[in-house]
Image (cartoon, rainbow, N blue to C red):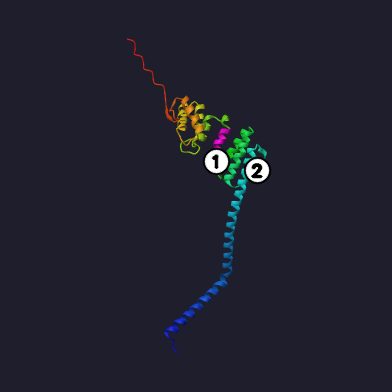
Amino acid sequence: MALTPQNNEAFLREVDDELRRDQLMTFWERYGRWTIAAIVLALAAFGGVLYWQHHQREAAGVQGEQLQAAYDSLGSGQTDAAAKALAPIAASDRDGYKALALMTEADILLSKKQDKAAAAKFAGIAADTGIAQPFRDLALIRQTVAEYDALKPQVVIERLRALAVPGNAYFGSAGELVAIAYLDSGRKDLAGQLFGQLAQNDAVPDSIRQRAVQMAGTMGVATDASGTADVRIVRPAAQPKEAPAQ
C-alpha cells in the first residue's frame, strides 16, 4: 500500500530522528568519557584561576599591612622591628611591595651610616629587570646619592644623563646631581644651563627649584623676581679696545 505524502514525511522524520540517536549513542560510546574529562578539567582550571586571583588579592593585602607595620615601627624608632617586618616583603615576588621594602631597608642602612651597603642594595634594585622601571630609576638616583663622594663627576653624569632631562619624572633630583657633577668637573657653563632649566621648570619640586635659582644666580644665569630663570648664560660684556696712540 503506497504511503500518502503526509505519512511519507512523518516516516522520513522518524528515520532521521532514529539515525541521529544512533549517531549520538555512537559518539557517546566513543568519546563520552573524554568529553566528561575535558569538561571537568576546564571547570578545574577555571576554579584554579579564581582561587589564584583571590589568593593574590589576599597576599597583596597582607603585604600591605606588613609594610605599614614596618613604617609604623620606623616612625617610633624601632628599626630592628621594622627590618624584621620588611624581610619577607623584600623576598616576595610582588615587585611593587618588594621594591618599596628593599628601598626602605637601604634607607635604614643609610640611617646607620652604612653608605656602601645601602648603595649596594639600591644598585640591586636598579639592576632588577623584574621591578618596574620607575622604581629602578629612583633606586639609581638613590644609589648615586649614597656613593656620590666616592664617584668621579663623569660617572655621575653618564649614569644619570638619561634622567636629567625636562619631562622625566625624576628631572629634579637627577638634574640637580648632574648639575653639581658638571660644576665639580669644571663645566660651569653646562652646570649653569642645567640649574637654569631646573629653576624654570614648574614640575620640579619647590625645594630643588629654590636651590637651583640660587646656584644659577652665582653662575651668572639671569633670574627674575618671580623665581623663574633665563637659561641663557650671562657673560660680562667685552671691554672696548683703546684707540692706538697717535
Q: Are marks 1 and 2 in contact (CB under 8 Å)?
A: no
Left-right relation of 158 to 40: left
- Give x and y (percent) for residue 234: 42, 25
Left-right relation of 23 to 235: right
Cα separation, mark 1 vs mark 2, equals 22 Å
Residue 136 numbered tag: 1
Quarter occupied by residue 115: top right
Q: Secondary structure at mark 2?
A: helix
Q: Name the residue rendered at 57%, 59% in the picture.
A: 46
Left-right relation of 9 to 56: left
Q: Name the residue rendered at 62%, 34% in the picture.
A: 111
Span shown in magenta: 132-146
Q: Name the residue rendered at 59%, 69% in the picture.
A: 33
Residue 115 numbered tag: none
Identify the amino acid type marked 1.
Answer: Arg
* Majority secondary structure of magenta residues: helix
- Give x and y (percent) for residue 14: 49, 80
- Give x and y (percent) for residue 45: 58, 59
Q: Which residue is mark 2?
A: 85
Residue 140 in view (yes/no): yes
Magenta highlight on residue 45: no
Closer mark to the observer between disc 1 and disc 2? 2
Q: Residues within 10 Å of mark 1 (few under 14, many from 20)?
A: many
